[in-house]
């Protein structure tokens, strides 16, 4: 555009401020705004196609292009259809699911992830990446847990910040989703979340706040559900009072697709860009639907007849212009990179670093005699799972499954024989993206088990690779799971295998916790994830020991569904109440979710939050407690290089409210050679000691005696230090 201006014979100094990349962004925003008509301002506030909104063609201000997110760059879809457009150049690098990234407990990995996916987005000319997701894992049944970062607000907050920064280094906005208290898929567009303020501020907001204040996120996506009886895409308290008020967010609030539901509220309460499909994005289509969006014609009408004011319009339009100047029209041109060896390697490294060794009685790393036999049983050894799951569905250049990776790793060394064991989900396509696999199988469950046992019986080791997948009712957008168990009677297969082999390795691939009543019968258990393009390689790196496992659970694995803190229909999935239009769900458990529940009031879990083993061993010894500085020495006492995640929890002092037995407030991942030691320091702030006082509407660090607990999971504390606070502090 600058060239156009110059070619009209203007002198350099005549370049309008908004086009002058040397000028400050705010000056550019104000200049552009001053040149725009009301109609042009409204036009940039809503979609013009499934994933884009208009720019200002007259001024050369470009359109905004969004893409899902959060695990890779979505294939191009048709202008106004979810179906893919059939391009042949849009197969991306699929990165591991965010549950896997969270399991790395490694901020560097998160930065790497953000940088790589940001480069892919930039190369594909996208301005907004619809991710990452940081909704807290309140129930293990939530169909979208795999897209989120676990059950702890501190962990999610620490992990989201580098991701956002990495993405935005590429002049691509991270759009952190789904704001807020959106913790189930069941009736997600018609459920009102009733949450008290303490729970809201302590559990459900911190990761978003970190993304905004520490990560500097340029966009936030409102969620589908309601809170306080108001839809979250135009929720006054969440968007205006907290996000833009208390936190000072200067970016754009984007609606979830079809999540804006009311003309007046959309105009008034903090929504800046409306996306979706048809008029309300949810039900019927309308011709010329985009003009009927809440932030289109209805908003224009309100501006014209005075029901909506100029100031509100300018605020919304400024935010969108700021987004454009931060991304597409940024002073520093970036080009990105796409499907390159570096991205594949990053995907592999992250997937391996997130893989969690839950149990190991000697079966891992794999040791198979030359010419021996490895029996691999289970559908997830072969099923390609980059496709499916909802909006995070991807089309990838390639996807290595675990069986292929095992065959590659043991070529010329041992035979790898696969049997299915059970038939789960035979679908292979989603929104017209197809893996090209044929997963049909008409054997009976009995025959499948008998065939699997026959292969396993004389094998040197047996690896069962099962778990969930991304079809409806599993790890999938729009539906929740019905039970905590592995589906398709996989338990029967595991038990049958355990009866014929002493060396059974179970790999559970999922994005959410599954119950493991068979855990005692397995020699080793591995929690794997949807690993993306390099999924199989990463898993096999860990199984063979090429990578020493260092992943830690980002959520608790309970023994059974009865054990979880959500006990009533009121809590989950919600109830119908007379006189209320929408389902009501009540967060009666308050702050007691995840390990906060199991460690304080619940039964012990199957595997605790933060748990994960290594092929080496570590010792943790206290070395220093001075003031607010606490230090431990971590030593690798085994024979292999490895990494340990040292976790710092605070046990509270007595205070006027009931608090969890402990809460995570710090962690460091330490990589050590055999015999090597390192001292890890934790500094404890007043904030780390505080709870949210809803009446005072502030954080309170109550005077009294605290304990600083340092360990390797929420139920494995290795060192503890006393900490006294002599005076109550309000923050
Ligand atoms: C999902 C969002 C997604 C959007 C666009 C919605 O259904 O909830 O996470 O970004 O669609 O695909």
Image: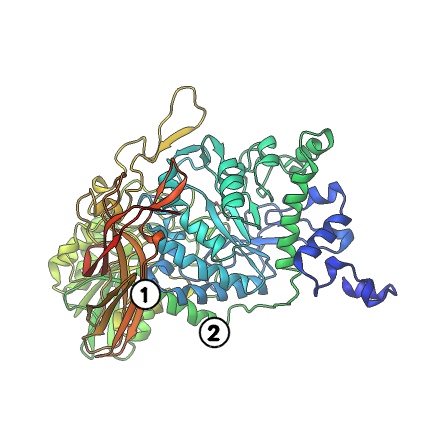
Position above or below: 679 against 424: below
Position above or below: 20 against 700: below
Label 2, on which residue?
Answer: 341
**Residue located 81% across and 67% down the image:** 12
**Residue located 66% across and 65% down the image:** 331
Mark 1 nearby-residue class (10 Å; few <14, some 14–19, many ≥20): some
Q: Nearer the viewer, residue 659 or 575?
A: 659
Q: Disc 1 vs disc 2: which is toward the camera?
A: 1
Q: Quadrant of residue 497?
A: bottom left
Residue 632 position, x and y percent, is 24, 68
Using the rendered image of the protein, determine whether residue 538 is visible from the camera's viewpoint.
yes
- Left or right: residue 224 compared with residue 610: right
Query: Which comes sooner in the sequence, label 1 or label 2?
Result: 2
Label 1, on which residue?
Answer: 668
**Residue located 35% across and 69% down the image:** 537
Residue 149 position, x and y percent, is 38, 54
Q: Residue furthest right?
A: 9
Q: Quadrant of residue 154?
A: bottom left
Q: CA distance from mark 1 to mark 2?
A: 29 Å
Q: How is the image coloured?
A: rainbow
- Left or right: residue 107 compared with residue 711: right
Q: Nearer the viewer, residue 340 or 13?
A: 13
**Total number of numbered discs in the rendering:** 2
Residue 648 position, x and y percent, is 27, 59
Q: Nearer the viewer, residue 426 or 155?
A: 155
């Amino acid at each position: 555009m600058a060239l156009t201006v110059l070619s009209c014979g203007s002198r350099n100094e005549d370049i309008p401020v908004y086009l002058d990349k040397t000028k400050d962004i705010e000056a550019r925003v104000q200049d552009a705004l001053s040149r725009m008509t009301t109609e042009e301002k409204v036009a940039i506030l809503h979609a013009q196609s499934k994933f884009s909104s208009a720019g200002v063609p007259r001024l050369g201000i470009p359109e905004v292009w969004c893409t899902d997110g959060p695990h890779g760059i979505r294939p191009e879809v048709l202008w106004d259809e979810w179906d893919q457009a059939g391009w042949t150049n849009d197969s991306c690098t699929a990165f591991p699911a965010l549950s896997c990234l969270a399991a790395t407990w490694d901020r560097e990995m998160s930065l790497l992830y953000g940088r790589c996916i940001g480069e892919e987005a930039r190369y594909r000319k996208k301005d907004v990446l619809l991710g990452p997701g940081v909704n807290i894992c309140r129930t293990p049944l939530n169909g979208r847990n795999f897209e989120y970062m676990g059950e702890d607000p501190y962990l999610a907050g620490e992990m989201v910040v580098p991701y956002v920064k990495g993405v935005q280094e590429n002049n691509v906005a991270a759009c952190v989703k789904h704001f807020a208290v959106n913790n189930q898929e069941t009736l997600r567009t018609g459920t009102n979340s009733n949450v008290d303020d303490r729970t809201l501020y302590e559990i459900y907001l911190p990761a978003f706040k970190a993304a905004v204040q520490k990560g500097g996120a340029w966009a936030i996506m409102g969620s589908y559900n309601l809170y306080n009886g108001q839809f979250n895409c135009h929720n006054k308290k969440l968007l205006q009072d907290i996000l833009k008020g208390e936190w000072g967010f200067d970016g754009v609030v984007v609606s979830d697709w079809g999540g804006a539901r009311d003309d007046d509220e959309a105009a008034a309460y903090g929504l800046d860009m409306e996306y979706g499909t048809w008029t309300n994005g949810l039900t019927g289509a309308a011709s010329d639907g985009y003009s009927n969006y809440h932030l289109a014609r209805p908003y224009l009408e309100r501006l014209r007849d005075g029901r909506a004011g100029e100031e509100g319009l300018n605020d919304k339009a400024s935010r969108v212009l700021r987004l454009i100047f931060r991304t597409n029209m940024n002073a520093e041109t970036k080009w990105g990179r796409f499907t390159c060896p570096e991205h594949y390697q990053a995907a592999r490294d992250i997937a391996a670093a997130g893989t969690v060794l839950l149990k190991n009685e000697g079966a891992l790393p794999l040791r198979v005699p030359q010419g021996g036999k490895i029996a691999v049983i289970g559908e997830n050894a072969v099923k390609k799972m980059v496709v499916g799951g909802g909006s995070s569905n991807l089309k990838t250049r390639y996807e290595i499954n675990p069986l292929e990776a095992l065959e590659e790793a043991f070529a010329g060394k041992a035979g790898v024989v696969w049997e299915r064991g059970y038939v789960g989900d035979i679908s292979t396509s989603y929104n017209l993206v197809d893996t090209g696999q044929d997963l049909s199988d008409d054997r009976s469950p009995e025959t499948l088990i008998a065939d699997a046992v026959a292969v396993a019986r004389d094998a040197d080791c047996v690896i069962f690779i099962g778990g969930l997948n991304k079809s409806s009712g599993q790890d999938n957008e729009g539906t929740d799971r019905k039970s905590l168990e592995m589906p398709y009677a996989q338990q029967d297969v595991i038990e049958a295998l355990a009866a014929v082999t002493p060396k059974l390795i179970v790999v559970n691939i999922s994005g959410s916790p599954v119950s493991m009543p068979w855990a005692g019968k397995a020699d080793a258990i591995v929690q794997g994830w949807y690993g993306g393009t390099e999924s199989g390689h990463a898993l096999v790196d860990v199984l063979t020991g090429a990578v020493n496992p260092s992943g830690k659970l980002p959520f608790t694995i309970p023994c059974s569904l009865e054990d979880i803190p959500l006990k009533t229909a009121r809590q989950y999935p919600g109830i119908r109440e007379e006189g209320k239009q929408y389902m009501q769900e009540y967060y009666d458990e308050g702050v007691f979710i995840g390990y906060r529940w199991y460690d304080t009031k619940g039964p012990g879990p199957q595997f605790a939050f933060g748990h994960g083993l290594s092929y080496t061993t570590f010792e943790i010894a206290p070395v220093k407690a001075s003031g607010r500085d606490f230090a431990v020495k971590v030593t690798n006492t085994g024979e292999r290089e490895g990494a340990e995640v040292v976790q710092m929890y605070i046990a509270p002092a007595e205070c006027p409210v009931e608090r969890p037995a402990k809460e995570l407030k710090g962690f460091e991942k330490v990589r050590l050679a055999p015999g090597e030691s390192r001292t890890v320091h934790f500094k404890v702030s007043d904030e780390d000691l505080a709870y949210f006082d809803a009446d005072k509407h502030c954080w309170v660090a109550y005077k009294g005696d605290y304990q600083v607990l340092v360990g390797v999971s929420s139920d494995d504390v290795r060192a503890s230090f006393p900490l006294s606070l002599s005076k109550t502090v309000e923050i």
